[in-house]
Image (spheres, helix red, strand yellow):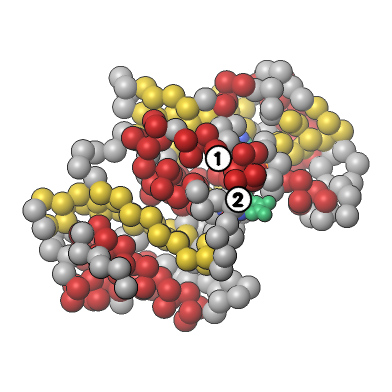
Amino acid sequence: MKSPAFLYSRPNSLEEAFSLLDRYAEDAKLLAGGQSLMPLLNMRLASPQVIIDMSQLNFLKEIQNDDSQKILQIGAMVRHSQVESSALVRAYAPLLSMSVGHVAHRAIRARGTFGGSIAMADSAAEMPAMTLAQSGVMKIGSSTGTRLVAANDFFQGLYATDLKPNEILLGINFPHPLANQRYVFEEISRRAGDYATVGIGMHGSFQGNVCQALQIVFFAVADRPRLLNRVTESLVGQVLRPPLIDQALHLLEEDITVLADLYHDVPTKLHLMKHLLKKSLLKITGEYADE
Ligand SMILES: Cc1cc2nc3c(=O)[nH]c(=O)nc-3n(C[C@H](O)[C@H](O)[C@H](O)COP(=O)(O)OP(=O)(O)OC[C@H]3O[C@@H](n4cnc5c(N)ncnc54)[C@H](O)[C@@H]3O)c2cc1C
């Protein structure tokens, strides 16, 4: 199918983009890499009056490290492939580096953008989930100014975010991680490059064998990426031995209301989640042996 007709605009400045958004509001769509928007248009699941192409907003295409504030800044128009090859991302937001190779295929990663994936908020997408796991903060702009929103408040449901129709996601700020963090990313998908069936990212610190801190996010299991609270509470301050891990698996459903997808029912999802959680916890302790 072909897209419905639309007006096309390619602003050279943010001010120009904001004034178009103020004028057209819900009738406008921002175009980043187009990897999700173009299929939506061609399938006629979206029919905006105007497309606002952000490709000239070059300052949104940068990855910068601010050592004085201890923040890594990823511009919204940074492509997945830039995230993949960035030494700064590897140093300051390792879960993004570990997971971005699972986003679709190389050709899509060469066009698709980090900000586009965050704004799209697909519950099975890697970048929103790992942004939550790395405590990312969204920088959002409009003609009235900029505001900051923590990832946990930004993702509000299936394809639903805190973004208003007159706003643009400008970038995402990541606080530098604490020292001595360990990281694990795992996902199960039907084929390499497919969206995840179940995915997990975690980081934590240890003193000797004792877990000092832990942050765990699951994705592709609910209407949005989800942090585990009950599970982590039961593990922090403890030595993560298999019997304790097995007990923690039973708390999963207290943290997340698991949803089925097109191919997997809830019991299957839960089974896969328990498998990934156990494997990841054993990995983070260094106790995992390949099956
Ligand atoms: C075959 C295929 C497989 C895929 N597999 C995966 C996968 O396994 N994992 C995964 O995570 N993704 C996957 N994707 C999606 C891909 O990662 C997209 O690149 C991403 O979801 C959207 O990024 P984009 O830059 O292409 O955004 P676009 O398609 O240009 O925009 C997506 C939406 O976000 C809005 N938007 C974009 N940028 C902004 C902004 N700065 N501020 C406000 N709103 C904005 C747009 O208006 C639009 O509604 C796949 C895509 C395809 C086509």
Q: State the image quarter where residue 71 is shown.
A: top left
Name the residue: 69% across, 48% down: 36
Question: Which amino acid is tagged 2?
Answer: His
Name the residue: 36% across, 73% down: 274
Give the residue pinned by disc 2.
105
- Image quarter in which the C terminus is found: bottom left
Name the residue: 79% across, 40% down: 27
Asked if the residue at tag 1 contacts the one at tag 2, i.e. Cβ–Cβ closer than 8 Å, the answer is no
* Res. 147 in view: no
* Res. 218 in view: yes
When the figure is inspected, residue 174 is found, relative to residue 18, above or below; the finding is: below
Instruction: Indicate if the residue with disc 2 has its beta carbon within 8 Å of ligand 1.
Output: yes
* Tag of residue 80: 1
Q: How many marks?
A: 2
Q: Alpha carbon of mark 2 to alpha carbon of mark 1: how far?
A: 10 Å
SS assignment at label 2: loop
